[in-house]
């Protein structure tokens, strides 16, 4: 089976998986009484007196199949209901407003996490039981042991409170930035401040946004890359002990070729798996990091909604998380087939 056929096959398999996820989420929703589910479509507190009308309007008292059809139709149209904690704000609008904050952190941190994780793990394995190995393992253990909010508060205490090099939040004057968007002074293209500022020719805003990203990105790189370091090291040590590596060395191949062309390529399968899980996990929200640095992403938003039992947001967040994980696994499977052609034969 060629790579193209393998990719098409994997994409087709995504369809029943997504359908299963949607059915599962709908099934969980059925555990909620119709009156509570009706709150999804309430935009004004006064409408709570008309719950029976809303139940009939959206068919919440119909058979399960009719309810599933009605709900899926609403979802496909982008109608996830209205948020109670945001004063009747459409959930999709709230999601579109907050997801760029999370995405911006992930865009800048994910490449660094993967790079440092693989690089340090490789260095550690190649220099087994030597000083570089001990140092990288110590860093990985410390980063894994201590909670992310500890590093976040530590960085805030040093660089925000004491040195005053930056501040928390997405920008120094984020309210002014939003006001300029509403006035039409700044045009919003993506919701990512670093990209929109460049597209608008606002270099000072771009620099300010980068300064505010440094601390949360640093925390994520330190915490998340520690897992990759350990996985890469373990996988590399296993690969370096294989007979084909011994044969490659016996043939006179250079140390660089043996390590990077043969050993590391074959050691990347478990590393790709962990990388995919890390990135997809970050895309579904960085609750602690967003809270500590007041970034206002979907992680903090969803956590607040869960605490206050805001059903529409919880359902939309669950659906978004499932879709992200499904497509992340699809990308990981494609990378598997690219790195190791033997997987396509399966």
Image (cartoon, rainbow, N blue to C red):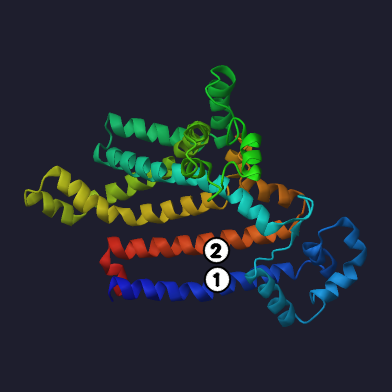
Residue drawn at (6%, 52%) of the image: 251
What secondary structure is found at the residue carrying circle 2?
A: helix
Which residue does the image show at 29% across and 74% down from the upper left?
A: 345
- Residue that appears at 45% across and 42% down: 108
Q: Picture coordinates of residue 7 (x, y %)? A: 36, 71
Q: Nearer the viewer, residue 132 or 238?
A: 132
**In this view, 158 is above or below 282:** above
Left or right, 257 with respect to 286, comes to: left
The residue indicated by pointer 2 is: 323
| Residue 18: assigned label | 1
Mark 2 to mark 1: distance in Å? 7 Å
State which quadrant residue 288 falls in. top right
**Viewer-closest of 123 and 74:** 74
Q: Can the viewer see residue 6?
A: yes
Specify the farthest residue to the right.
49
- In the picture, measured across the screen, residue 272 lies left or right of residue 313, that is left
The residue furthest top is: 162
């Amino acid at each position: 089976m060629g790579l193209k056929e393998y990719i098409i096959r994997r994409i087709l398999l995504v369809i029943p998986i997504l359908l299963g996820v949607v059915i599962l989420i709908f099934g969980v929703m059925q555990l909620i009484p119709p009156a509570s589910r009706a709150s999804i479509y309430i935009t004004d507190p006064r409408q709570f007196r008309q719950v029976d009308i809303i139940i009939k309007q959206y068919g919440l008292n119909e058979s399960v199949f009719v309810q599933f059809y009605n709900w899926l139709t609403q979802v496909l149209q982008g109608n996830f209901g209205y948020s109670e904690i945001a004063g009747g704000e459409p959930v999709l609008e709230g999601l579109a407003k907050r997801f760029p904050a999370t995405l911006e952190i992930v865009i800048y941190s994910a490449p660094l996490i993967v790079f440092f994780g693989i690089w340090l793990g490789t260095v550690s394995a190649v220099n087994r039981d030597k000083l570089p190995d001990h140092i990288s393992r110590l860093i990985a253990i410390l980063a894994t042991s201590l909670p992310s909010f500890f590093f976040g508060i530590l960085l805030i205490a040093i660089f925000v409170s004491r040195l005053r090099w930056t501040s928390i939040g997405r920008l120094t004057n984020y309210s002014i930035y939003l006001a300029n968007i509403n006035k039409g002074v700044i045009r919003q293209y993506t919701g990512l401040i670093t990209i929109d500022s460049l597209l608008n020719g606002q270099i000072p805003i771009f620099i300010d946004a980068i300064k505010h990203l440094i601390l949360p990105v640093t925390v994520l790189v330190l915490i998340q890359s520690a897992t990759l370091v350990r996985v890469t090291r373990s996988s590399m040590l296993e690969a370096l002990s294989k007979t084909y590596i011994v044969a490659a060395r016996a043939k006179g191949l250079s140390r660089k070729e043996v390590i990077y062309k043969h050993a590391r390529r074959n050691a990347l399968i478990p590393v790709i798996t962990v990388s995919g899980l890390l990135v997809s996990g970050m895309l579904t929200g960085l609750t602690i990091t967003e809270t500590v640095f007041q970034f206002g992403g979907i992680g903090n938003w969803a956590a607040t909604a869960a605490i206050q039992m805001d059903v529409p947001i919880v359902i939309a967040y669950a659906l978004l998380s499932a879709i992200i994980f499904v497509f992340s696994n699809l990308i990981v499977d494609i990378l598997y087939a690219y790195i190791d052609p033997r997987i396509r034969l399966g």
